[in-house]
Amino acid sequence: MSLRKTLIATTIAASLASTGSFAADLDSLQKQIDELKAENSQILANLESTPDSTSYSSTTTIGGYGELHYNNLSSDLNNSEKKEMDFHRFVLFFAHEFNDNIRFFSELELEHSVSGDGQNGEVELEQAYIEFDTSDTANIKAGVFLMPAGIINETHEPPTFYGVERNNVEKYIIPATWWEGGVMYSANSASGISYDLAITSGLYNADGVIRSGRQKVSNAAADALAYTARVKYTGIAGLELAGTAQYQSDLAQGTTADEVSAVLLEAHVRYTISGFTATALYADWDVDINTTADSQNGFLVEASYKFTDKIGVFARQTEIDYQKNATTFVEGAAQTDVGINYWPHEDVVLKADYQLQNDEAGDYDGFNLAIGYQF
């Protein structure tokens, strides 16, 4: 065989050998691909049959609000001053949706920055309830929730109201912020009428001191439960008209020979048109007690005007008669507030106001500043 024929034969043989090796490699690669496909199919099947452990990422939400206050007040009556800087409230909301009809809400608050023995602040659980939808227009709450009374008790985030401090009527008479443990049924209609019916724990103060009677659902005495009903109408744009009634058979919770029954009646109206808002509120406690604390009441009138989405001004007048403590009944405590709110963002607010008090209220006059937020 010539050298040329030998070289050709060698080249052909090498090519055939190479082709055979390449074919073998292809078969091996195909087998590996088939095995990976089978494994992937099994993994997908397992995921489909296993509950989604990361569902919280889309059904659990976090929010909150807070406010820093500066008060610069003085009283000629008491010959004293109140010049303080206070991070009054730091609040976190946690909510979770179990399904389309069952959800959880909570609110955890730190007041005055620091809590503990000898400190000014408290850590409080203001809300923690499960809400069950019973229809498209009704639900039931069970747990700890805010009472359906007044204007700011349920909606009190700083960007939602005027003035640095909450008004005295809703602070001492209603008394916001006020929460109880129990159950509440709520329903609404297309006509704008809604109502709430609640059975809850009640207040506990045999002397008829309403604000001090809040038990905050902390080993709360429950000899005498409270029964609350509210009706609200919002069927006209810009209008809110509401009334609340609560009955409790014994503020003393069985600790005195005679029961101290109490009835709260509250009504308010708020109307907004073209940036102008007018608000009026009246609240009254009728307490079955043989002291001046048997009648405690107060009223609020407020006018505000929002020039733009960012700037608004207000003027407010309040007056209350209330049992301040076990030995002191205050009658005709009046306060006037005027001020301005500035919202650099709809959920962030800067506030400034000036207050004037009469002698019955303490005669503390001066200005207040605040920054608040919600998210």
Image (cartoon, rainbow, N blue to C red):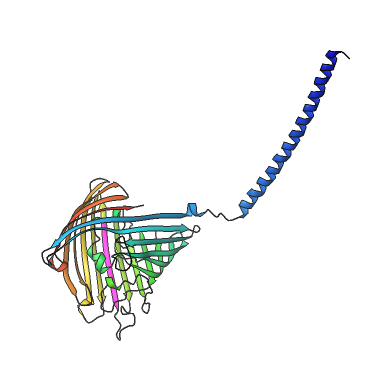
Q: Main secondary structure of the magenta part?
A: strand
Residue at x 77% of width, y 34% of height: 24
Question: Which is nearer the eye, 363 or 13?
Answer: 13
Q: Residue at position x 64%, y 49% from top?
A: 43
Q: Is residue 193 left or right of residue 98?
A: left
Q: Is residue 239 left or right of residue 103?
A: left
Image vertical order of residue 202 relative to residue 93, above or below: below
**135 or 331: nearer the eye?**
331
Residue 39 x/y as whole percent: 68, 46
Q: Nearer the viewer, residue 370 or 21?
A: 21
Residue at 80% from the left image edge and 25% from the top image edge:
16
Residue farthest to the front, as pictured = 3
Q: Is residue 139 left or right of residue 22?
A: left
Residue 356 in view (yes/no):
no
> Which residue occupies the extreme right position in the image?
1
Q: Quadrant of the N terminus?
A: top right
Would residue 262 be counted in the magenta stretch?
yes
Q: Which residues are magenta?
A: 258-270
Q: Nearer the viewer, residue 114 or 71?
A: 114
Question: Hey, which quadrant is residue 30 in on the image?
Answer: top right
Point 29% across, 74% down: residue: 263
Is residue 191 covered in magenta?
no
- Residue 284 percent location from the top left of the image: 24, 71
Q: Position of residue 130 (x, y in %)?
A: 45, 64
The vertical placement of 99 against 41, above or below, is: below
The image shows residue 79 at horizontal and vertical percentages of 11, 65
